[in-house]
Amino acid sequence: MNAIKRFGSAMIVPVLMFAFFGIVVGLATLFKNPTIMGSIAEEGTMWYNIWSIIESGGWTIFDHMELAFVIGLPISLAKKAQARATLAALMVYLVFNNYINAILTLWPSTFGVDLSQGVENLTGVKEIAGIPTLDTNIIGAIIISSIVIWIHNRFYDKKLPEMLGIFQGLVFVVIIGFFVMIPLAFLVAFVWPYVQQGIGSLQVFMTHSGYVGVWLFHFLERVLIPTGLHHFIYTPFGYGPAIVDEGLKAYWITNLNDFANTTAALKDIYPYGFFMHGNVKMFSCLGIALAMYYSTPKENRKKVLALLLPATLTAVFAGITEPLEFTFLFIAPYLFVIHALLGATMVTIMYMFGVVGMMGGGLIEIAALNWIPLSSNHGGIYIIQAVVGFTFVALYFVLFRWIIVKFDVPLPGRKSEEVKLYTKKDYQNARQDDNHEVEEAPKYDSEYEEKAVYYLEGLGGKENIKDVTNCATRLRVTVNDPDLVKDSDYFTKNQMAHGLAKSGQSIQVIVGLSVPQVRDYFEAKLK
């Protein structure tokens, strides 16, 4: 289970880039639309040409999605020399696709794919880095990258005889991968067409699963957040072939201009109600924050507002909900389950009323990929979206506030102790030795280094660290002895972290959006 969690969190590395590139393509589509922009956006104008250039750059991640995952996974999962593991994964993945190309070229009738007809004339194939090959999508990329990571972690430090020393390290990993890919390529060439048929059947099932499928998708995406397994829910839908071959996000962006120019109902031409969990981030989190604020005694509300405001704005605008959700997750887990139930119900109701689109992120991404380019012909569904959304804001507020007050949930500001936002100076002044003498405050390069040192101490020191990775907001650590890890109060003291999750040897420190920088310093302290 710990390995699965680490693997799920590793997938967030490439996924984080999709939001930016998607917004770029969405804005380019908007600014190239003459219906919205007028004659300045007609084909052939300088305005049109400039945005065409920008749009071509925005398509980079979607045109090379497989490479993004091949390269992204080793960054998080390689236990040493991550840069070399990344290069090894890329090279072995290209070797694998060259093998596939050669196999299909030599035996087209045996494997049922004749590449001589051209990639553009065949289904189930594509060109990756200039290599015509089977379209294994991100599934193939993840499998190959995972194999290389395993080889790297096991054999990178392998000592070879002196005369073969030139083949140690990176080269040795690539050599092993080179030969492992031969039987794997034959296996994939034989099996993958059947896998594609299975994926096609799954697409048909999910497409026709209706409201039940939509509700289940969004419920699982939210309720699995504490486990880190929610990546396995939305990634195959948004970026893989669970519904459409290229993933819903690429499909939506590809057809965005057509959607913008048609007056037909969006649900008729895009019948998919998945990947709309951004509504939970915008509306649900707002209702929760209001409930937390108004259930706080009046004398503490200003102090609690200082905590809630940045967390809520981050959730609503950027789509990163964990700083807010984890505030009540560890104190009252049942509230989180209620949150998942209500959020899935809200999105399903929106879908019933015809709201569809690419709404996986926060307000910024949703506006760029939906509201702005489509409002001229489809503004009505966004009014419905807002009505349903704010109705649920009110429902969340009433229900959560009642539960918090009724059961006296000890959220921040409702405890007897003072609610305070601490400064770095407060923290340094609080570090005293056993004789209550003030220690000389250590000097750090940045707050990231300070947090890394603080976390390392709380996790039992570097000898207790087995491995480390991160997702969007959490530092994920496997420790040797979980009894050496300090409790959640240590990590949340002085606002050093948002919380702590423990599951055996698997520890998650809820850091926030700065977790990649903190991890860099954390790993440096382990050397």
Image (tube, rainbow, N blue to C red):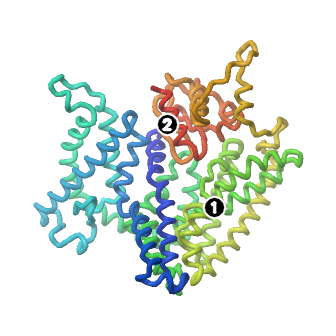
Determine which residue is flagged by label 1.
Answer: 280
Q: 448 or 468, which is in the foreground?
A: 448
Residue 250 at what x, y percent from top left?
43, 67
Q: Residue furthest right?
A: 299
Is residue 117 visible in the rendered image? The answer is: yes
Residue at 46% from the left image edge and 32% from the top image edge: 467
Is residue 344 visible in the rendered image? The answer is: no
Sequence-earlier tag: 1 or 2: 1
| Occupied quadrant, residue 446 | top right
Residue 305's place in the image compared with 207, above or below, is above
Residue at 59% from the left image edge and 38% from the top image edge: 509
Can you say which quadrant of the picture contains the C terminus?
Answer: top left
Determine which residue is flagged by label 2.
Answer: 520
Q: 129 or 197, which is in the foreground?
A: 129
Residue 437 at what x, y percent from top left?
74, 15
Residue type beneath disc 1: Val
Residue 479 at what x, y percent from top left?
51, 29
Q: 478 or 85, which is in the foreground?
A: 85
Compared across the picture, whether 101 is left or right of 485 comes to left
